Amino acid sequence: MRRFFVSPGDIDNSQVYIKGSNAHHLTQVLRLKEGDKVIVFDGSGREYHVVLKNISRDLTVGEIIDVSVSGRDSKVRVSLVQGIPKGDKMELIIQKCTELGIAEIIPVLTERTVVKLEEGKKEKRRERWQKIAQEASKQCQRSIVPHIGEICTWNQYLASIGNDDTILVLWENEKTVGLKAFLENNKHLDKLTLVVGPEGGLSQEEVEELLQLGARTVSLGPRILRTETAGFAALVMVLYELGDLG
Ligand code: SAH
């Protein structure tokens, strides 16, 4: 069945409102008709089974016939704090991590981040990334859309860390503790954060600041992975060991 993402405000007790480009896609491209059934999701985890009632070019109204919770979302909540990389690598990271089951991605400007983002452009960029997460969720039939946090500075990120957060810093200079060993000893975790540096890595000072806040460093093995590989490799390992992958 076709799936449509709408914002939570477009769903009431008995009806959903499919608007804008979604409505256009529904009528002009898919040529759906009144009486056809579709699935609508709003990113919250619920899925609405809907019969289309009133179809026009810019607005389709559907009647909700059933609500369910999708079984496609992992109970283990993994957040990725990603040092913003160059070019469009962030888009790839968001798309792949969404498919694999990430809960949240927080883009941070680190000491070695090369891209310069003007203040006015940050929100636009974040919205674009959020849209990519939305599209990827739709494609892989997740009903929870990962949240893309506001682009923040390193200090803003440090200030947001809570006391009970489990934070793993993926660090190529960690020679003793591997992610594998960490996960074997922490099988009951249901929430954790992975921190990945940009192309040039995290600085020694950044790693130390995180350690002071209770984070720990882990290695992903003997090879140096690209920044766009490190996050999703780690995510796969976490959700394979503790979650629902594999
Ligand atoms: N500082 C290095 C490589 C950075 S790789 C350099 O410039 O040569 C980019 C990021 O990927 C790192 O900050 C780290 O978070 C992650 N990463 C890559 N390989 C890793 C490994 N073997 N173990 C843990 N993290 C790794």
Image: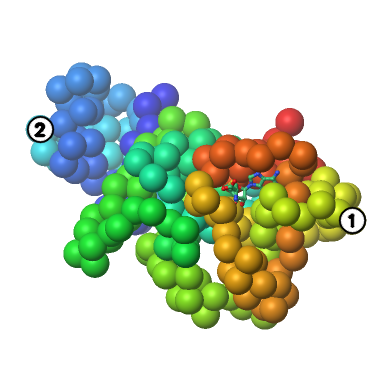
Frontmost residue, 227 versus 125 = 227
The single residue placed furthest to the left in the displayed view is 57
Question: Image height check: is 117 above or below 88?
Answer: below
Q: In the displayed structure, does residue 19 sit left or right of residue 171? A: left
Residue type indicated by callout 2: Arg
Q: Which quadrant would residue 41 be assigned to in this image?
A: top left
Which residue is painted at 18% across and 37% down in the image?
21
| Image quadrant in which the C terminus is located | top right
Image height of 97 relative to 116, above or below: above
Q: Which residue is found at the position 52% from the left and 80% from the top?
A: 159
Give the label on residue 10, or none. none
Mark 1 Cβ inside 8 Å of ligand 1: no
Which residue does the numbered mark 1 point to in the structure image? 185
| Residue 209 rendering spot, x and y as whole percentages | 63, 75
Give the quadrant of the N terminus.
Answer: top left
The image shows residue 113 at horizontal and vertical percentages of 43, 56
In space, the residues marked 2 and 1 are separated at their CA atoms by 55 Å
Q: How many marks?
A: 2
Visible residue check, residue 120: yes
Q: Quadrant of residue 137?
A: top left
The residue carrying mark 2 is: 57
Element type at marker 2? loop
Few, some or many residues within 10 Å of mark 1 (<14, 14–19, 20+): few
Above-or-below relation of 95 to 34 = below
